[in-house]
Image (tube, rainbow, N blue to C red):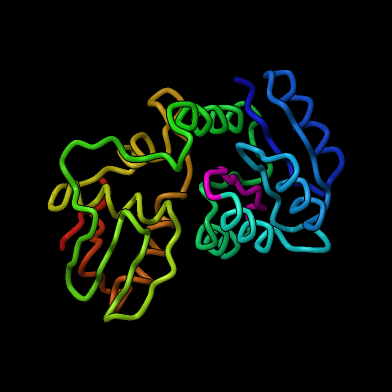
Amino acid sequence: MQHKILIVEDEEIIRLGLQDNFELENYIVETACDGEEAIAKADSFGPNLVLLDLMIPKKSGFEVCRYIRKKHPNCFIIMLTAKTEETSKVAGLEMGADDYVTKPFSILELLARVKAFLRRAESSNTTPEIPATTVVEDAIDFADIHLDFKKYIATKNGEPLEMSAREFQILKYFWQHRGDVVLREDLLQDIWGYTPDNMPSTRTIDNHIVNLRKKLEDDQTNPKIILSIRGAGYKFDA
């Protein structure tokens, strides 16, 4: 099966360079140079994965990300960001992006990340599920939080929480391993699909945790639910 990749980048040299490299890897590639074209291509082309620059004309990468996540929920989105755009990375992840790479980036690392995501897609036609090590209820309650993993509904004190499919997956994984220390490498391997030999040096996990704390914790500066374990990872205390 040939996977389809949409590259959204307004810098022509980068866009054409990425297209050449991914076509050499036998992917079917389409490109877009602005947000409006990206949305149109997403609908007509139906990509398995989108490489999305955030700083693009006409419609921003954030708008494109939000649109693709809503209309094409099974499509993976990897953001292309500048090194100084830390807040942009967090905002993009909040809107449903799966990962990000920082410019300038290694094409070999980017290829490895894309392969990892698409390898997961090969085993399922739906949003990738976490391998079940224990039985997890369709819906759970803790503190003042209600999570429905089947309907993808979340509430806090009865008020709806807007959460991405990836955030539900992380919380489901934490619930499966509540009380245990979960390593960042565990999350990258079991949820993102990376293998030990292509594990990225990325703060993707930390940014997702920041977003989750904003939504779940009463005081994100003093978290009670998702605890940081120095030098290791996180512990879910529900």
In the rendered image, the quadrant that contains the C terminus is bottom left
Range of residues picked out in magenta? 73-83
Q: Is residue 178 shown left or right of residue 1? A: left
Single out the residue that lies furthest toward the right: 12
Percent coordinates x, y for residue 63 in the rendering:
68, 63
Please, what is the dominant secondary structure of the magenta stretch?
A: strand
Percent coordinates x, y for residue 31 in the rendering:
79, 40
Q: Is residue 35 shown left or right of residue 123? A: right
Q: Is residue 210 shown left or right of residue 227? A: right
Residue 220 lies, with reference to residue 190, above or below; the image says: below
Q: Residue shown at 39%/72% (left/top)?
A: 161
Q: Residue shown at 64%/59% (left/top)?
A: 67
Query: Which one is in front, 3 or 79?
Result: 3
In the rendered image, the quadrant that contains the N terminus is top right
Q: Residue shown at 57%/59% (left/top)?
A: 92
Q: Residue shown at 83%/63% (left/top)?
A: 58
Percent coordinates x, y for residue 206 in the rendering:
40, 54
Query: For residue 204: magenta?
Result: no
